[in-house]
Image (spheres, rainbow, N blue to C red):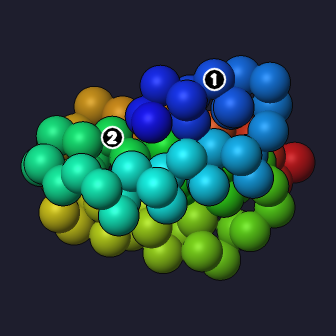
Amino acid sequence: MLEQARREMNKPNPRGALDALDSLERQVSTPQLEREAALLRAEALCVSGDKQRASEVLDSASIRWPSAPGIATVQRICARAEK
């Protein structure tokens, strides 16, 4: 499901990515997948225009995983999406 969400983002289809992430969240819960899913969710929310929810998810991820390498990448993607 995480791969499906990535494929949807490459289309780009952020709504499809969010649907895949919702399914993943209901079925699987491991720390690594949670982190990857949270960052991908924030990215999808930014791209889909939901900046408020994206910011909330990204802030939460930054608190939970402050040294996660993907956080800076998603922050850059969100900054570009605002322009």
Label located before the other in sequence (2 or 1): 1
Question: Helix, strand, or loop for circle 2?
Answer: helix
Q: Residue at x 18, y 55 (%)?
A: 29
Q: Which residue is mark 1?
A: 7
The mark closer to the camera, 2 or 1, is 1
Q: Amino acid at mark 1?
A: Arg
Which of the pair 27/14 is nearer the observer? 27
Q: Looking at the rendering, in which quadrant would you find the N terminus?
A: top left
Label number found at residue 36? 2
Q: Amino acid at mark 2?
A: Glu
From this view, report whether residue 39 is shown above or below residue 45: above
6 shown above or below 18: above
Residue furthest toward the front?
A: 27
Q: Is there CB contact under 8 Å for labels 2 and 1? A: no
Residue 73 on image: x %, y %: 48, 33
Can see residue 75? no
Residue in the picture at 68% in, 32% down: 9
